[in-house]
Amino acid sequence: MSRFFRGGDDSSTDSSSEEEEVYSSEEEEKVKAEDESSSEEESDEEEEEESDEESGSDEEEGPKKKGANRFLQSDDESEEEEEEEQSEDEATTKVKSAKDKRFDELESTISQIQNGQKINDWSLIASEFDKLNRQVVKLQDGSKAPKPYIKVIADLEDFMNETLAKQKVTPKKMNATNARGLNAVKQRIRKNNKDYQTQIDAYRKDSDTFMESDDEIPAPKTVSKALRFAEAPVVSAEQQEEDDKGFSTVDSRGKVVQYTPESILKHLRTIIESRGKKNTDRLEQIKVMETLNKVVPITPYQRIRVLQTLISARFDLGAGGAAQMPLDQWKAAERDLATLLEILEKEKDHVVVEGAEEWDDDDKLPTIPEGEKYLKVPGSVVSLIERLDDELTRSLQAIDPHTSEYIDRLTDEGSLYNTIFRGLLYYEHLRKDASLEVPQESLNRIIQRRLDHVYYKPAQVVKILEENAWKQVSAEADSEITPRSQSGDAGKLINILSNYLFENSEGIIRARAMLCQIYFLALHDEYYKSRDLMLTSHLQETIANFDIATQILYNRTLVQVGLCAFRKGLVYDAQNTLQEICGSGRQKELLAQGVMIQRYSQVTPEQERLEKQRQLPFHMHINLELLECVYLTCSMLLEIPLLAQTGSSPDVKKRIISKTYRRMLEYHERQIFTGPPENTRDHVMQASKALAAGEWKKATDFIHSIKIWDLMPNTEDIKTMLAKQIQEEGLRTYLFTYAPFYDTLAIATLSSMFELDSRKVSAVVSKMISHEELAAALDQVTETVIFRKGVELSRLQSLALTLSDKASSLIETNERTLEQKTQGSANAFSRKDNRGGGQRGGRGGARGGARTGGNPQRQAGGTQFTGGALGNAVRG
């Protein structure tokens, strides 16, 4: 048999852990022997003590085994080790439930507080007191707290009062850390003890009876590990269910939160006070208010206050930076606002008005004061509606417009319009009672929001929005401003809303109302009405004084009026209107449809963020490619005849209608090879080149082949109008170019050349003659155009006139420069004592000698200085 087996009992149930115990005991004996030998060398006294200990241990352990027997274990030793191991397991390892562990932690914290009281350490007491309040929440049974907790907070309050009394009579001050801890406990304990005042009073009345009463929390129970393994999970599961059953909702400070009708106002005040602070969990606040909104029973006043605070808290999630409000929170806020309006419509005696007094008593509900008809709740419905509208705009700005998500999000505009409409009806109802003193500005703001949602939409879409809005309200409801009977006509609706704001508002709202009406009229091809309104408003003179959002609306309206003029065939008016926006090259920025990134611009992050916030949602954009196409086409129809006129008549003063178009045309002419047109700009440039050469049919084909015309209504009518315009301007260009080479020209020839009616050709020629653009006469008998000769200057004469003009401008420039330099010093060129006249040679001497005769008076306008030799030549 191996020496590693026992000599006595060879049971198979012995574990390997017992063999390891044998090895460890023998090794310990060897270590002890080495320690004894080292101690003998140090001192004799230590030798005696070590020998006594060694002898004692030898008597206990018995004789040592030698050789192979030292690895064996006797029966007595094995039985003793098993008993010791079993007793140690029962004595030290216990399985406790979660509740028992929490109770132990509570007792430990109470002990720390009591130790702090003994040494007067208020810093320790303050930290442990906060920890104690967090722990007791998990051990509360309903509204009752554990009795050890009641005992310690009652004693702590008494001890605090004693300490404060001593501080008043003791000259020695407490150190800063201790004083901060005392103040912290002083602020917290009194507020904390109010929740447990009944139990504290019972404890102070008779502490012994209170601590020994039957409703005391039972002592911790322990489960021995000696129990069978199969029984332990059953006990812990039952205990866990029992523990969870007594749990309650707690706040951030660890206190139990009870949602009752009486506590609603207290919870709301706590939430309102914590708004805007750091480390505030906004989602948790929203959950709390959603729970408060479901409390039964709840009064209308409480429901209104809860909904107001809840909507504001949801808006806080989208506050700050470029973060937009989450979609689910926006929809929830829209539902809450609709619910609020429903409650206000049902409860006629409850009104939400600005400037109402805040109700400070959270323990009782307010009532309608005597002599009044309404219970006024402070708040602003129009502010909530405006914020909801702004959050929808921010959300649309952040979504890619080319995805289905944008379309889905845009459908929420219908529900938002219904909310705005119901808010308008509510404010109309409030305005009927003059005692409420509802400001006119609130009604103007909500009407402006309604107008902002319809002014840029086609009439058919506006009609659908209005029908859906009236379906959401009761059949008896009606509006004094926009009656139900007129809701089907979009034009009347826009006119009524704009006129109401124009009469009852001023400043920005009034200007925006006019611009919205002009935009709507121009969108629906009523050019002359929109033009007259724009001119009579005089906004072009004062628009620079308005805010940026209004300036953007002005630019959009101006562009829409220009497009309307183009659709009417008024090319000159369209080009003149669009020149200010399109000629700058910053259409995208001026219309708030994108941010222009310039090469050398220094834009701060704050400016860039503000610029992005001003951008309009994609569905409100004006097509920039269509706008550029209209502008370049109008410029082509005006510039090509002008270029032909100035080219054939050098005496005509050169003028430029569109610098942008001229620059593009010059760039196109400098190109050595021009391929087929690829974009809108190439089509217009090649059409311009063909029109200048008299090939009007080719120019028409180039213009008609632009696909962007399909985005405009009545595409065929527009193409027909463009063809007629190109024919007429082609005729004018031909006459300007080839007039010097004709003596007479038959109208029939021009009519067949440009495929125009003879009467139309006669009208165009007569107009050119009357405007002195063409030196000719129209013979109506023979129907010919007779050109006058000798009227045009020759090339030499034209150059001589040009030189004369430049010389005159040079003289004027010199005289102005001299006057600026010698202003206030009439004797600037005089020499004292006649010096400088004959002492200088050459040019200087000549000039000096010429002035020796004195200083005659200067003539007005500086005509004495004639520019030297050039001036003499001009005069001679």
Image: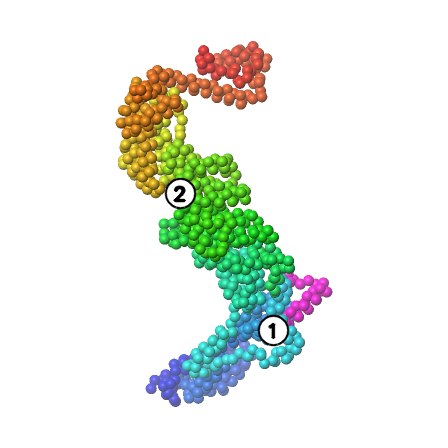
Q: Quadrant of the C terminus?
A: top left
Q: Up-down: is 512 above or below 370?
A: above
Q: Quadrant of the N terminus?
A: bottom left
- Residue bearing mark 2: 622
Q: CA distance from mark 1 to mark 2?
A: 72 Å
For label 1, the SS is helix
Nearest the viewer among 746 and 231 is 746
Q: Residue at x 56, y 52 (%)?
A: 432
Checking the image for residue 436, the label placed there is none
Question: Bounds of the magenta span?
Answer: 154-179
Where is residue 788 drawn, in percent x and y? 34, 17
- Residue bearing mark 1: 150
State the colouring used for the structure image.
rainbow
Q: Is residue 413 magenta?
A: no
Q: Up-down: is 365 above or below 471?
A: below
Q: Residue at x 64, y 77 (%)?
A: 207
